[in-house]
């Protein structure tokens, strides 16, 4: 039985459905959990040794599950990541691990890692040089290519914009001095359709097809989901994308072009799975929690496993 004191921290600003699912699954495994905002965590460097204080915890947790890293100024984001790095330095397991979070929460670095490892991913423009961005943007549009602007830090399809011609207005200030544009993949008559592959460890757990009301497919933006079987080659593509980012669990987004080739468009380090849960009889939260506990070297309650 779980005691009354939390021993697992769930990092999130908005627990919502996902937070409650994790909390319930952890409790079934015998672990109490507490929702923690990184904004409320502190370094204590005035004692004999360096310490980190988390609200709700009298001592360090046995493990930290990251459901989100808040945005903010550069200094704030660095501070939040410092907290996670500091916890790992103090031998507290963080899931996904902080280095992998840093690499994959940044869409530009994700594209760089995918390209560097010869994983098919759309051509992208990633720069803080406005002259270079404008030149490459005009060059692509003159070649009748479409481009998708994506916030470097963002999820659920928020802030994305499809650029089809030079006359479209682009608010560079909204990008905070760094621009990331991804070449739009021509899916032919299947425009507005993509695929989410849910990977835990080195295993594909479940796959779904998303169909959007427009070219944006995210469930949070109205996308409809259904279970789908993807071939071994496509699944291996998703597994390789997760491997090069160093993530322990991830949602990999794929688009199939009109020639039938699959491209990796995103590798999500804090993936949502509410939509995916609608397409499978598996309890995804429990599978994720089991992987988390294994990562933390914490015992599983085998009587309660899925």
Image (cartoon, rainbow, N blue to C red):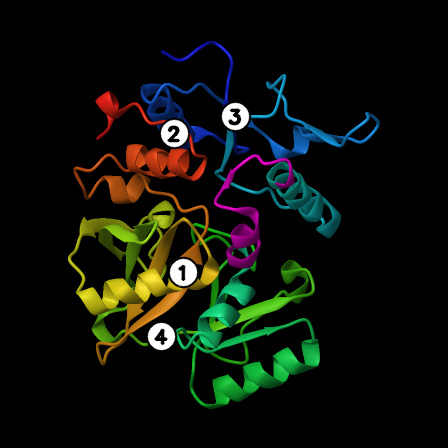
Q: If you read the primary sequence from the N terminus, does the residue marked by circle 1 or circle 4 appear first?
A: 4
Q: If you read the primary sequence from the N terminus, does the residue marked by circle 2 or circle 4 appear first?
A: 2
Residue 283: image location, x then y, percent: 24, 34
Between disc 1 and disc 4, the foreground one is 1
Front position in the image: 195 or 167? 195
Asked which secondary structure carries label 3, the reply is strand
Q: Which quarter of the picture shows residue 79?
A: top right
Distance between the Cα atoms at labels 2 and 3?
10 Å
- The residue beneath circle 1 is 243
Q: If you read the primary sequence from the N terminus, does the residue marked by circle 2 or circle 3 appear first?
A: 2
Front position in the image: 299 or 60? 299
The answer to whether residue 95 is magenta is: yes
Distance between the Cα atoms at labels 4 and 3?
39 Å
Residue 118: image location, x then y, percent: 41, 77
Rendered view: 143 above or below 168: below
Residue 22's disc is: 2
Residue at 40%, 24% (x, y): give it. 23
Between disc 1 and disc 3, the foreground one is 1
Residue at 57%, 54% (x, y): give it. 102
Q: Give, as a single range, the part of the protein colored magenta.
A: 89-104
Q: If you read the primary sequence from the N terminus, does the residue marked by circle 4 or circle 3 appear first?
A: 3
């Amino acid at each position: 039985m779980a005691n009354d004191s939390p021993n697992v921290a769930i990092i999130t600003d908005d627990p919502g459905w996902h937070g409650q699912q994790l909390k319930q699954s952890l409790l079934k495994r015998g672990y109490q959990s507490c929702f923690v905002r990184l904004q409320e965590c502190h370094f204590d460097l005035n004692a004999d040794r360096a310490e980190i204080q988390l609200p709700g915890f009298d001592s360090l947790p046995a493990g930290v599950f990251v459901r989100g890293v808040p945005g903010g100024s550069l200094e704030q984001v660095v501070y939040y990541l410092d907290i996670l790095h500091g916890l790992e330095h103090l031998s507290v397991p963080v899931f996904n691990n902080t280095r992998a979070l840093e690499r994959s929460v940044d869409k530009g670095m994700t594209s760089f890692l995918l390209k560097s490892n010869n994983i098919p991913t759309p051509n992208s423009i990633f720069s803080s040089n406005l002259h270079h961005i404008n030149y490459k943007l005009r060059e692509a549009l003159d070649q009748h290519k479409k481009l998708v602007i994506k916030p470097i830090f963002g999820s659920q399809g928020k802030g994305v914009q499809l650029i089809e011609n030079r006359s479209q207005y682009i608010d560079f200030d909204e990008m905070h001095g760094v621009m990331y544009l991804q070449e739009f993949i021509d899916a032919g008559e299947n425009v507005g359709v993509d695929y989410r592959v849910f990977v835990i460890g080195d295993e594909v757990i479940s796959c779904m097809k998303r169909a959007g009301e427009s070219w944006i497919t995210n469930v949070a933006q109205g996308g409809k989901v259904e279970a789908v079987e993807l071939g071994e080659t496509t699944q291996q593509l998703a597994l390789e994308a997760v491997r090069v980012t160093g993530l322990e669990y991830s949602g990999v987004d794929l688009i199939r072009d009109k020639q039938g080739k699959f491209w990796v468009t995103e590798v999500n380090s804090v993936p949502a799975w509410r939509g995916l849960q609608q397409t499978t009889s598996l309890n995804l939260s429990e599978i994720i929690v089991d992987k988390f506990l294994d990562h933390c070297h914490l015992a599983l309650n085998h009587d309660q496993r899925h």
